[in-house]
Image: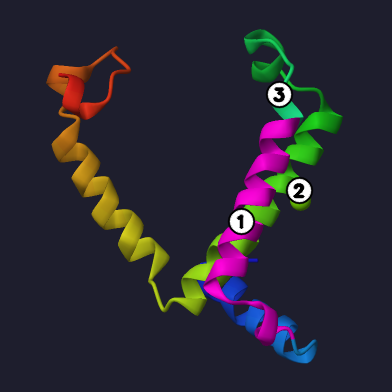
Amino acid sequence: MRDLEELKQRQRAFVAERDWEQFHSPKNLAMALAVEAAELVELFQWLTEQQSAAPDEALRRRAAEELADVLWFLVRIADRLDIDLLAAAGEKFAENERKYPAARVRGQSRKYDEY
Ligand SMILES: [Mg+2]
């Protein structure tokens, strides 16, 4: 798959063919997105920092599957809400550059309002 637009168009066809639009309310999609993110978290839940930083091939494959699930619901809910994901990400990126100027926050992990 080449880009988010292709994924969105393929999702629309996949969902329409199965008559699943009726289940894809923003509420349901947000819940599904959170569930898939939790499945990703579960893979790393009891690992040490070192283990999580050096996953074996099986764990990497399972993480890829959960990341794909997260992306699926992320793109689907954005489509349902008519939100341009990359435009929204660009705006958020600019906001984070303002909130976290490198010269002030370099090497620190505190939240922007704690500086
Ligand atoms: Mg999953």
User: Circle 3 — which element?
Assistant: loop
The label number, if any, that marks residue 73 in the structure image: none
Q: x%, y% of residue 66?
A: 72, 46
How dense is the environment of label 1, judged by Cα within 10 Å: few (below 14), some, or many (20 and up)? Answer: many
Closer to the chain start, of discs 2 and 1, is: 1
Q: CA distance from mark 1 to mark 3?
A: 18 Å
- Can you say whether 107 is above or below 64 in the image? above
Q: Report the side of 90 relative to 50 (left or right).
A: left
Q: Is mark 2 within 8 Å of ligand 1?
A: yes
Which residue is labeled 2 in the image?
65
What residue lies at 71% left-to-right and 25% top-to-bottom? 44
Q: CA distance from mark 2 to mark 3?
A: 16 Å
What residue lies at 60% left-to-right and 81% top-to-bottom? 9
Question: Mark 2 is on which residue type?
Answer: Glu
Q: What is the magenta range?
A: 20-42
Cβ atoms under marks 1 and 3 closer than 8 Å: no
Which residue is labeled 1 in the image?
33
Q: CA distance from mark 2 to mark 1?
A: 13 Å
Q: What main secondary structure does the magenta stretch of the protein show?
A: helix
What residue lies at 38% left-to-right and 62% top-to-bottom? 86
Q: x%, y% of residue 42?
A: 73, 32
Closer to the chain start, of discs 1 and 3, is: 1
Q: Report the side of 51 relative to 8 (left or right).
A: right
Q: Is residue 23 magenta?
A: yes
Q: Is residue 33 magenta?
A: yes
